[in-house]
Amino acid sequence: MDIKEAIVNRRSVKHYDPDHVMTEAEIEELMQHAILSPTAFNIQHWRFVQVADKEKRQQIQDASWGQKQVTEASLVLILCADLNAWEKQPERYWAQAPEEVQGFMLPAIANYYTNHHQGQRDECFRSSSLAAMNIMLMAKGMGYDSCPMDGFDFDKVASIINLPHDHIITMMITIGKKKEDARPRSGQLPLNEVFFKDSF
Ligand SMILES: Cc1cc2nc3c(=O)[nH]c(=O)nc-3n(C[C@H](O)[C@H](O)[C@H](O)COP(=O)(O)O)c2cc1C
């Protein structure tokens, strides 16, 4: 599937075949491509929790106002991010770069994020949203459908997955074999309402 086809055909699917099993190899392939998504300063602060345990799935469905895709999907991912990844051995993020690049980047990371709490949090949403799109398009290319979700109680899901105190949840994604098509697109705004040249 080419990129254009994946973009056009990706829809938020709410009904999956509950009996379909995604292989470990498929999950690995999907996630290896998720982590190729870009992050500022290459801090790679996204964290992905696969919820495989049936009981936890049910608890998360209950915390998602009963949305069935949570238990019917072949794969449920909770997208999280580490707010403090920027200061946790940042030399790892530039380990293969030339020394002069490391010498520039490491102080730049500290300079950008230190005491910049809003920026640290915004970065989590930027990065995990980019990873989410990689995941959903990659899934489409692999013959799967997906649904991004934020219709759940974030605090309850945080407690179910034992979220570390300095991480946040950004969204959830369900992935599986479609049992029912998405409804026709509900109405796209015309391009000229959302796309501007030079200024608003
Ligand atoms: C951040 C985000 C959260 C969403 N949360 C939910 C959700 O909780 N449940 C759901 O059924 N769909 C959810 N959606 C799917 C949207 O309803 C859907 O993307 C939108 O209607 C456009 O349809 P499409 O994705 O099929 O193009 C969410 C989408 C996004 C981007």
Image (tube, grey):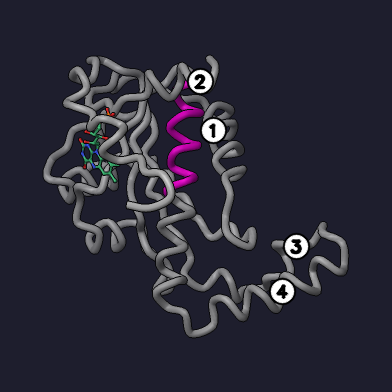
Tell me whether circle 1 and circle 2 mark residues in contact (CB < 8 Å).
yes
Residue flagged by tag 1: what amino acid is it?
Leu
Q: Secondary structure at mark 2?
A: loop
Query: Between disc 1 and disc 2, whose residue precedes?
Result: 1
Q: Which residue is mark 2?
A: 142
Residue 63 as seen in the image, left or right of residue 92? left
Most extreme residue toward the bottom is 115
Up/down of 76 relative to 23, above or below: below
Residue flagged by tag 2: what amino acid is it?
Met
* Residue extent of the magenta highlight: 129-142
Q: Which residue is mark 4?
A: 106
Q: CA distance from mark 3 to mark 4?
A: 8 Å
Query: Between disc 3 and disc 1, whose residue precedes?
Result: 1
Residue 102 position within the rendered picture, expressed as x and y whole percent measured from the top left: 79, 69
Q: Residue at x 25, y 59 (%)?
A: 154
Tell me whether circle 3 and circle 1 mark residues in contact (CB < 8 Å).
no
Mark 2 C-beta closer than 8 Å to ligand 1: no
Is label 2 or label 3 in front? 3
Residue 174 position within the rendered picture, expressed as x and y whole percent measured from the top left: 33, 35
- Label 1 Cα neighbours within 10 Å, binned few <14 / some 14-19 / many ≥20: some
Query: Between disc 2 and disc 4, whose residue precedes?
Result: 4
Q: Which residue is mark 3?
A: 94
Q: CA distance from mark 4 to mark 1?
A: 30 Å
Q: Which residue is mark 1?
A: 30
Tell me whether circle 3 and circle 4 mark residues in contact (CB < 8 Å).
yes
